[in-house]
Image (spheres, rainbow, N blue to C red):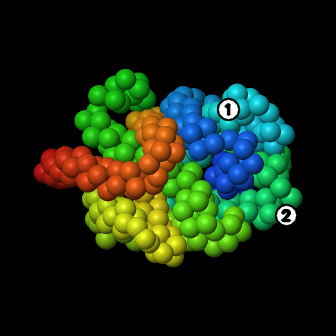
């Protein structure tokens, strides 16, 4: 197994990616206070979430392609810097249009990290070790969720809404300095057999086209859990922000177990990420149904949302981190990762916009019912994809 010359890059990348999750989940934690103070309403928060997802999706596509040809430390430090400045400035509560522009600057900056991190891992380790490292790396999302809820809730309670953006911005700025000091010599290794495939050729691959639909649909679920979960518990059950944190925290904690269990589940499914995603979508559909009924206890709602988040975390790891490794031989890991993440956040953007309006007028029932339907549709695409990959594997074995 090859090892990096700089052993600090992996833990630093983990902490850096965790920090930018804190610097994007702060909007969710601050939303109840922003609504109560009349600074924003649900539709405006939905628009912030929607545009964030669309811009993030575009950033993943563009930055995924750029990451194949730019030094990792440049992409990572630039993303962290813009995210930090955006959050620090939002902390001063500019007019809504300014907040919208700054939040979307944050959205474009954050995806500069992921593709570069995947490229370094894939270029540094053999394929099996790279998959294992990726499985560890994706737990930074759940870790960022948990730490973000705890930190942002404590900060808002003690210091006020402003510091829910200022303090995460400051932490992200510290990560910029750490990257500049320790990662400038880290490079994404290039394969001697690399034959880069242009993006438009990649999109003609049937395997990728079939995977795009479930990527879009799971995105409609995943990021809208984190966007609306705090507002849901505060408005639905009349719990204050500090009290809701205990229920909200259950969601990323259960989600973390999903991330941690992914390697085991992946092995049990014969290292077929599509088959694993089918089972995970079944869990999503089953857990979404109880949320459609009223009344429901806060603990029961938290468990159902946690199960859904754990399932979509497994799907997210399978489609956005493991699936792109299939394209390592052609040097297109970052590009495929960018395309898949673009699809996921496009779905998140559509979902945030639609759910912001429906929640404002009809409550949460339409959102949860749609998650069950979305899951069943995704299973149909993944079933076809699983059959396709099995047929290709059989042909390769016979050859």
Q: Nearer the viewer, residue 117 or 291?
A: 291
In the rendered image, is residue 392 in sight? no
**Residue 225 left/right relative to 211:** right
In the rendered image, is residue 152 in sight? yes
Within 10 Å of disc 2 (Cα), the crowding (few <14, some 14-19, many 20+) is: few
Check disc 1 and report the residue beneath it: 100
Residue 194, x across and y down, in percent: 44, 34
Q: How far apart are the two marked residues, 2 and 1, measured between alpha carbons?
A: 26 Å
Q: Are marks 2 and 1 in contact (CB under 8 Å)?
A: no
**Residue 208 left/right relative to 328:** left
Q: Nearer the viewer, residue 34 or 226?
A: 34
Residue 166, x across and y down, in percent: 82, 48
Along the polypeptide, which appears first: circle 2 or circle 1? 1
**Which of the 4 image quadrants contains residue 3?**
bottom right
**Which of the 4 image quadrants contains residue 263?**
bottom left
Q: Nearer the viewer, residue 145 or 133?
A: 145
**Count the marks: how many?**
2
Residue under the image location 28 percent in, 58 percent down = 278
Identify whether 8 is placed above or below 67: below
Q: Secondary structure at mark 2?
A: helix
Q: Secondary structure at mark 1?
A: helix
Check disc 2 and report the residue beneath it: 158
Within 10 Å of disc 1 (Cα), the crowding (few <14, some 14-19, many 20+) is: many
Identify whether 106 is placed above or below 389: above
Residue under the image location 81 percent in, 43 percent down = 91
Question: On residue 280, which mark appears?
Answer: none
Residue 158, x across and y down, in percent: 85, 63
Residue 220, x across and y down, in percent: 43, 46
């Amino acid at each position: 197994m090859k090892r990096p010359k700089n052993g600090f890059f992996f833990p630093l990348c983990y902490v850096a990616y965790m920090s930018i999750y804190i610097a994007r989940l702060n909007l969710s934690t601050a939303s109840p206070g922003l609504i109560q103070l009349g600074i924003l309403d649900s539709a405006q928060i939905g628009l912030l979430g929607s545009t964030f997802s669309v811009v993030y999706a575009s950033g993943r596509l563009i930055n995924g392609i750029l990451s194949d040809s730019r030094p990792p430390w440049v992409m990572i430090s630039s993303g962290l810097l813009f995210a930090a400045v955006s959050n620090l400035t939002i902390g001063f509560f500019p007019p809504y249009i300014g907040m919208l522009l700054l939040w979307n600057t944050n959205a474009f900056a954050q995806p500069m990290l992921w593709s570069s991190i995947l490229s370094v891992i894939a270029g540094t380790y053999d394929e099996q070790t790279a998959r294992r490292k990726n499985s560890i790396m994706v737990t930074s999302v759940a870790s960022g969720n948990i730490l973000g809820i705890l930190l942002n809730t404590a900060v808002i309670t003690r210091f006020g809404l402003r510091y829910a953006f200022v303090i995460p911005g400051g932490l992200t700025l510290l990560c910029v300095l750490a990257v500049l000091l320790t990662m400038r010599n880290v490079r994404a290794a290039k394969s001697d057999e690399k034959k880069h495939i242009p993006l438009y050729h990649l999109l003609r691959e049937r395997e990728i086209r079939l995977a795009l639909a479930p990527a879009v649909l799971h995105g409609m679920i995943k990021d809208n859990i984190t966007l609306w979960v705090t507002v849901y518990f505060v408005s639905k059950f009349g719990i204050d922000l500090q009290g809701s944190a205990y229920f909200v925290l259950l969601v990323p904690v259960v989600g973390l177990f999903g991330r941690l269990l992914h390697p085991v589940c992946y092995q049990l499914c014969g290292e077929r990420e599509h088959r694993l995603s089918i089972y995970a979508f079944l869990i999503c559909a089953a857990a979404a149904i109880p949320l459609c009924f009223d009344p429901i206890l806060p603990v029961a709602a938290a468990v159902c949302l946690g199960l859904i988040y754990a399932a979509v975390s497994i799907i997210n790891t399978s489609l956005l981190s493991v699936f792109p490794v299939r394209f390592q031989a052609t040097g297109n890991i970052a590009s495929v990762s960018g395309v898949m993440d673009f699809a996921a956040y496009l779905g998140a953007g559509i979902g945030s916009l639609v759910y912001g309006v429906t929640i404002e007028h009809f409550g949460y029932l339409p959102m949860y019912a749609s998650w069950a339907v979305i899951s069943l549709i995704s299973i149909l695409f993944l079933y076809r994809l699983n059959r396709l990959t099995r047929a290709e594997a059989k042909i390769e074995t016979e050859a």
